[in-house]
């Protein structure tokens, strides 16, 4: 809260744009794969906190891991590139944490759902720039993102 008012929800696209700009375009999918794995951790944490929706949240975590794995499989040297990305961007985990820090769970779900929708749009943008095999992978990733967004949006709608 600031001056007794709730903090506005962060603009995930605006926060991540400068980070993406630091990474060569050809390696940006691998940066996003790192973000997918961080999201998977977040979903697993939420699953532990929300036992009533544990299975749905764990399924979201599995989708995040699947996205990361599919993208990493496109790069024979993915692990080395990701190590370099992390080394060149030591603030990634802090940025990831601050987006969600000290917010009620409903706001965290809203932020994550927006991130999933943004992720889907980003994977589609990569697909438009890619060869057909990579494009198919990126389009599949977009669908996985949208599935997780739908889960979060349904949970939020159920909370009223």
Image: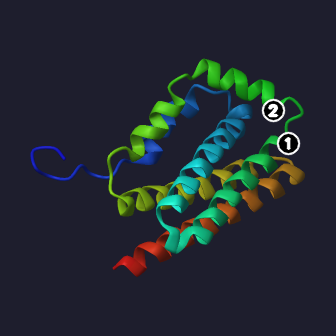
Residue 12: x, y in percent? 44, 47
The answer to whether the residue labelled 1 contacts the one labelled 2, judged by CB atoms less than 8 Å apart, is: yes
Q: CA distance from mark 1 to mark 2?
A: 8 Å
Nearest to the observer: residue 13 or residue 157: 157
Q: Nearer the viewer, mark 1 or mark 2?
A: 2
How packed is label 2: few (under 14 Cα within 10 Å), some, or many (20 or more)?
some
Q: Residue farthest to the left?
A: 3
Residue corresponding to mark 2:
78
- Disc 1: which residue: 74
| Residue located at (59% from left, 48% from top) | 41
Locate the C terminus by quadrant: bottom left
Q: Is residue 91 left or right of residue 35?
A: left
The location of residue 154, given as percent across then percent down, is: 49, 77
Q: Position of residue 117 (x, y in %)?
A: 55, 60
Mark 2 secondary-structure assignment: helix
**Residue, x 76% and y 61% (percent of image)?**
140
- Horizontal and vertical percent for residue 137? 81, 55
Q: Nearer the viewer, residue 59 or 84?
A: 59
């Amino acid at each position: 809260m600031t001056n007794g008012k709730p903090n506005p929800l962060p603009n995930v696209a605006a926060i991540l744009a400068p980070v993406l700009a630091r990474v060569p375009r050809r390696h940006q999918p691998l940066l996003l794969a790192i973000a997918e794995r961080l999201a998977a951790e977040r979903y697993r944490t939420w699953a532990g906190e929300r036992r009533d929706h544990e299975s749905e949240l764990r399924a979201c975590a599995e989708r995040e891991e699947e996205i990361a794995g599919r993208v990493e499989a496109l790069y024979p040297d993915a692990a080395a590139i990701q190590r370099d990305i992390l080394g060149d961007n030591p603030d990634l985990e802090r940025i990831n944490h601050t987006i969600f820090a000290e917010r009620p769970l409903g706001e965290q779900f809203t932020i994550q759902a927006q991130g999933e929708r943004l992720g889907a749009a980003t994977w589609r943008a990569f697909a438009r720039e890619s060869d057909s095999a990579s494009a198919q992978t990126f389009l599949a990733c977009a669908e996985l993102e949208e599935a997780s967004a739908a889960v979060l949006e349904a949970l939020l709608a159920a909370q009223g």
